[in-house]
Amino acid sequence: MVAGELLQEQHVLPDSTPDGGGTEGNTEEESGYKELSNGSVHITLDPKTLEQELPPPDEKEAMLPGEQNNEALETRLYWRRFAVLAVFSLYSLVNAFQWIQYSIITNIFMDYYNVSSIAIDWLSVVYMVAYVPLIFPATWLLDKKGLRMTALLGAGLNALGAWVKCASVGPGLFWVTMSAQIICSVAQVFILGLPSRIASVWFGPREVSTACATAVLGNQLGVAIGFLLPPVLVPNTADDKDLMGHNISIMFYGTAGVSTLLFLLTIFVIKDRPPLPPSKAQAVLSTGPAEDYSYKKSIINLFKNKPFILLLVSYGIMTGSFYSVSTLLNQMIITHYPGEELNTGRIGLTLVVAGMFGSILCGIWLDRTKTYKLTTLIVYVLSFIGMVVFTFTLNLGNLLVIFFTAGVLGFFMTGYLPIGFEFGVEITYPESEGTSSGLLNAFAQVFGIIFTLIQGQLTTDYGPLSGNIFLCAWILLGIAFLSLISSITEEH
């Protein structure tokens, strides 16, 4: 206990009368310390002593675990980290592709399975619904069993779901494709929380934000390919259901083959952590006693963190808005531009590819500046502006304008995703990055479900304009929550 802590204890002790006797064995340096009859300690320091900085009685007691042993702080970067990042990013890509592959050609799957647009929307929404109850056991598994076990579950379930989809090719087999999508949605739970864990345990301190952004990038690239390929692989052949089914099977079997290959690579490439940690922060954490960790306590600590609670809501609003726009993009575009399924996919591609550039640039910026609060707020405000512009130019009758506005919206809205992850890790350290990321994603899914269902109903009943205005209002509210984070952290 350092002298400052001892002084704080003295303020709360009851008044007592010293017995005037000195402590046995005191030296001249300890003459300022006298013992009270009730066992408390009274400090009377010479003015000259007050001018000096008092070291703790035992400096080792004030050190973090691992700092007492220089060998424990040995760090090293391994080339394997790039392979781990690549494999994870690729199977995350396939999982994201399977999420959006139905929604971008909603009208085609409605015709093939003879179901409503709401039923097709649920093929996307089920990803969000499954995530919310399963994120807590998934993050517990990540913290207790490690990165490798979590990655194997994510890649394995992703491949299994893809193969079940191959058995769903048939007009009366919508329930099979829904079952397959549920399996893929469970796989997603073991995927979305890993970017920050992979970045922190495999990459150096000046690479963490960029690595996290790259890991998130794989998921975004999957969404981009999910916008681009389905309209190409499954054109609208309403007059030939057999051809439509054949085209759908090609898409499903191709996805299953790729996801199986990536599962095998996951087995051989991904490990829990490198032999030596990549940074001193990880070295310190890795030398701490594992039995001291409590998942329940970590969750409680996070929910007591006011800035993190505000980030949860604001991140949920922004990411939920992105999920809703992605799911309903086909319906929004086709309303104003009938027959433009292919261009709808290209607009979605533009939205996500621009967001990928935004993610990487923001990750590099954070690695160089560490300005988490300012960068998060600026990107959020620009996302709001992009959403407003997209909303009021959608019905102008010019597809080139939609391509441009979708690109601007995607650059900032999708670019915000890794920033939110890294900001969450920053304001919750030393809590597990897997737990904080899992909670951020859980709130994103909750808002995604609410926004998709409400915006979808508004779009069906009143048109795309009313649904998009609904999202604009919520994003504006998210800006207010982020502003409160800045004010709270400045006060402390």
Image (tube, rainbow, N blue to C red):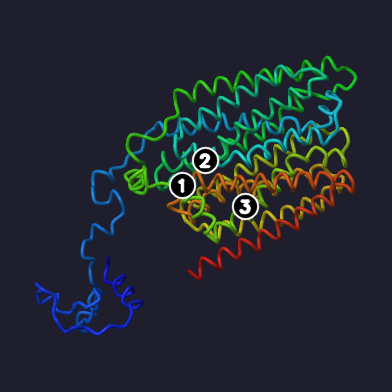
**Residue 14 picture location, percent across and down:** 33, 80
Work out whether mark 2 precedes mark 1 in sequence or the reverse, and give the earlier one.
2
The quadrant in which the N terminus is found is bottom left
Gap in Å between the C-alphas at discs 2 and 1?
9 Å
Gap in Å between the C-alphas at discs 3 and 2?
18 Å
Residue 204 image label: none
Image point (56%, 68%), residue name: 487
Q: Amino acid at mark 2?
A: Thr
Q: Secondary structure at mark 2?
A: helix
Badge 3: residue crowd in 10 Å (few <14, some 14–19, many ≥20): many
Residue 139 image label: 2
3 and 2 marks in contact (CB < 8 Å)? no
**Residue 182 picture location, percent across and down:** 68, 30
2 and 1 marks in contact (CB < 8 Å)? yes
Badge 1: residue crowd in 10 Å (few <14, some 14–19, many ≥20): many
Q: Amino acid at mark 3?
A: Tyr
Badge 2: residue crowd in 10 Å (few <14, some 14–19, many ≥20): many
Q: Which residue is mark 3?
A: 315
Work out whether mark 1 precedes mark 3 in sequence or the reverse, and give the earlier one.
3
User: Which image quarter: residue 252?
Assistant: top right
Using the image, determine if residue 327 lies above or below residue 245. below
Q: Which residue is mark 1?
A: 432
